[in-house]
Image (cartoon, rainbow, N blue to C red):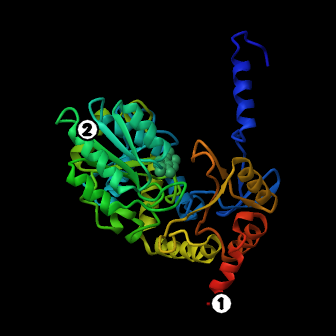
Amino acid sequence: MQETGSGIEHHAALELAALDVAGLRRSLRTLVPLSGSQVKWHGHPLLNFSSNDYLGLSACDELRAVMTEAIGRYGVGAGASRLVCGNHAPHEELETTLAAFKGTEAALAFSSGYATALGTIPALCGSNDIIILDKLCHASLIDAAKLSGATIRIFPHNHLEKLERLLLNARKVGDVNKRILVITESIFSMDGDAALLREIVELKDKYHAWLLVDEAHAVGILGPQGRGLIAALGLEKRVELQMGTLSKALGVSGGYLAAQRSVIDLLINKARSLIYSTAPPPALAATASAAIKLVQSPVGDALRIKLMQHKQSILPLLGDNNQANLPAAILPIIIGDETVAVNTSEALLEAGFLIPAIRYPTVARGTARLRLTLSAAHEAQQIEGLITSLLNLVPQLHGSKERALKKTTE
Ligand SMILES: *Cc1c(COP(=O)(O)O)cnc(C)c1O
């Protein structure tokens, strides 16, 4: 490449070299999907244990047919932002479907979960306000909180006493009219555990705060008809802001915020990621509506049962991680060292399994892990093959073979 003289190539090369040294350099890989659970990479078929497509819906024939038909009717793009001339019937239908699914008056669809957070949080909070987040909240929530200009406070993961102290302090200082927004996920993306949602709801009510719960990894999987953890606990009327994505268990792409009608109307006026961005293709919205209906149907129930069977067969391997009764599909295998995690992931790749190493800054330094995700698209014998390879290749699991055997002979 030509030197521009600006020094930007030199800057980039130095930063990349530092990432290399720290074992933190990332790069893109191109995968060819072979089936719901298999991909081809550099000519090799791999079993995919890294996707968030927990129910295998991204490859679902019924949804393919819906999208194809909708493309025939609406074309491939929306043409403009929702407020200009990009608002089509499938967008409206998706939002009606989402509101019914989440048990709220209304919902608003965005082009991604990330765009949902970035649009919603700064529309509701500003520099006079306080946002309190769980330490393990997703980057989209943290970025959105920063963008809002509000004062940010963090509580250690699921630490209720610390949350209460932050709420108490937030109510004490400054303007009595300031808003306090508590943010958590329902199932955490890198640990697969659940928020203490009932207790958090009690606390935010006690201090007159609002609560935003991101259900990215719970929707489609937990709760009656896959409605999520909020619905599983009957808290639909008590959580002000229900956020989620259409891009994970729903198999498609996009994000949403479900809330009372007035809140949604305000977001239509103030959420900049909605106002200044082209609407998602109407065909995508039509497909997402169909995915939500499928998830709520007996087909969805059957997929959830299959997913949980996989989880039950692999849990003994991972030891007691408090996850046994939680129907979440994320199973972290904590390795610790970043380079060891990457090497382990590569050894698994050689053995035919795609399980990425997750490192800083996605997770804290020294807590690098393999993030194993299960899908209803997997077959039982693929899970068995995975268990064998994990036992052979992940030293951290030594001792768990005995546990696994003990479990089966009990
Ligand atoms: C994936 C994810 C998002 C972002 O959703 P996209 O639709 O992929 O942009 C937001 N929050 C959490 C917790 C996530 O895991």
Amino acid type at mark 1: Thr
Q: Nearer the viewer, residue 119 or 279?
A: 119
How far across and down, in percent of the image, does residue 30 sit?
Answer: 72, 46
Q: In the picture shown, does residue 272 fall above or below 402?
A: above
How far across and down, in percent of the image, does residue 346 sit?
Answer: 78, 54
Disc 2 packing (10 Å; few <14; some 14–19; many ≥20): few
Direction left: furthest residue? 176
Quadrant (top left/top right/bottom left/bottom right) for the C terminus: bottom right
Direction bottom: furthest residue? 410
Q: Is mark 2 within 8 Å of ligand 1?
A: no
- Residue 72 seen: no
Left/right placement of residue 376 relative to residue 237 reads right
Q: Nearer the viewer, residue 18 or 37?
A: 18
Secondary structure at numbered mark 1: helix
Say the numbered circle drawn on residue 266.
2
Secondary structure at numbered mark 2: helix
**Which residue is tagged 1?**
409
Sequence-wise, the earlier of marks 1 and 2 is 2
Left/right placement of residue 193 relative to residue 154 reads right
- Residue 105 seen: yes
Direction top: furthest residue? 5
Quadrant (top left/top right/bottom left/bottom right) for the N terminus: top right
Separation of disc 1 and disc 2 at Cα? 58 Å
Q: In the picture shown, does residue 14 fall above or below 305?
A: above
Q: In the picture shown, does residue 395 fall above or below 325?
A: above
Left/right placement of residue 134 relative to residue 270 reads right
How far across and down, in percent of the image, does residue 351 sit?
Answer: 80, 62
Quadrant of residue 229 within the rendered picture? bottom left
How far across and down, in percent of the image, does residue 159 sit?
Answer: 39, 55
Amino acid type at mark 2: Leu
Q: Nearer the viewer, mark 1 or mark 2?
A: 1
